[in-house]
Image (cartoon, helix red, strand yellow):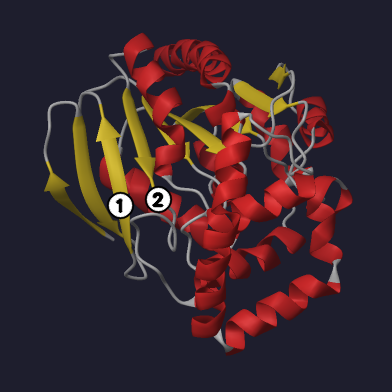
Amino acid sequence: MSIATTTAHPARRRAAVRTRDGVALTVLEYGPHTADLTVVLLHGHCGRSGSWTQVRDDLRRRYPSARVVCYDHRGHGNSATASRRTYTLEQLGHDLRDVLDAVAPSGPVVLVGHSMGGMTVLTYLSQNPHEIGARITGVGLIATAAGNLSDAGFGRLLRNPAVSVFQAAVRYAPTLMQYAKELARKVFAPIVRTAASGARTYDPRLLTLANAMHNQTPIVPMAAFLTAFATYDRTDTLALLSAIPTLILCGTADLMTPPSHSLAMATAVDYSDLVLVDGAGHSVIMEHPRRVTDALTRLMTRATQAGHRAVAA
């Protein structure tokens, strides 16, 4: 694992962190090097670090003394692609370790993940349980789940045989499938624009498909991670989070990871802060950034206090 700074700026620093298996991840840092607290924001499947822009900027205004770190997962955004076999949540947990070691090797850290980012956080903590309450002083799980994805919401589509057919097609003809995805992006672009403007309401299933095709994530990682979701289960990690401040947030209209997942997690984590944003969908961090920032501000305050207690002890 190595780190190479590519852009230096008083407010933003851009770096390439090379993972242990040689994949270059694009990392953005904001705030002082000497910050007492580092907050790492992890994006979801087929997203990129830019999905956090509004929340990130609001956090920086409210918490100027903190360092905020965002990065693109392998195969996403500006990070490099990798072998299809490495598109697993276990590998994303190892990638998070490499990022932390490179940009925040010491001091308390708050991990915040949206959707697949939240699954990455839970996977990382299952791999490094000794860091809970020591290095990791707070966790935010946003529009995500700890397991049983195929039991509710659109996660039930993971059981559909068509998913396996789609994945097989990507494995055997990735170039052709990528070309088909590019064509689909053009077809669905008007739907995405119209829905975003609020000019027309679409069937949620059509809008979900449109958003999936409209994103810029290559077809191989997009398809490969579906296998990871089908077998994902980190429910045993939830009890460990009772030791640190934990935020669990979800939109009431989230069709991808419905509120039932968040309620189940909150039940398993003592003293967790459960926030349900009325009417918000799966992209709650972009739909209602102020509500998300309000909740994260409370989390950071609690995490800072917990960190001070840990140092005093």
Where is residue 106 shown, x and y percent of the image? 31, 34
- For the point 27% across and 55% down, the residue is 17
Marker disc for residue 72: 2
Q: Is residue 166 left or right of residue 160?
A: left
Q: Residues within 10 Å of mark 1 (few under 14, many from 20)?
A: many
Q: Can I make out residue 151 in this image?
A: yes
Marker disc for residue 133: none
Q: Considering only order in the chain, which callout, 2 or 1, is on the residue closer to the N terminus?
A: 1
User: What's the residue type where badge 2 is placed?
Assistant: Asp
Q: Secondary structure at mark 1?
A: strand
- For the point 62% across and 69% down, the residue is 223
Where is residue 182 shown, x and y percent of the image? 50, 68
Marks 1 & 2, CB-CB < 8 Å contact: yes
Q: CA distance from mark 1 to mark 2?
A: 6 Å
Residue 103 to residue 4: above or below: above
Q: Is residue 81 left or right of residue 43?
A: left
- For the point 13% across and 44% down, the residue is 7
Q: Which residue is mark 1?
A: 26
Q: Can I make out residue 134 in this image?
A: no
**Viewer-closest of 313 and 276:** 276
Q: Residues within 10 Å of mark 2 (few under 14, many from 20)?
A: many
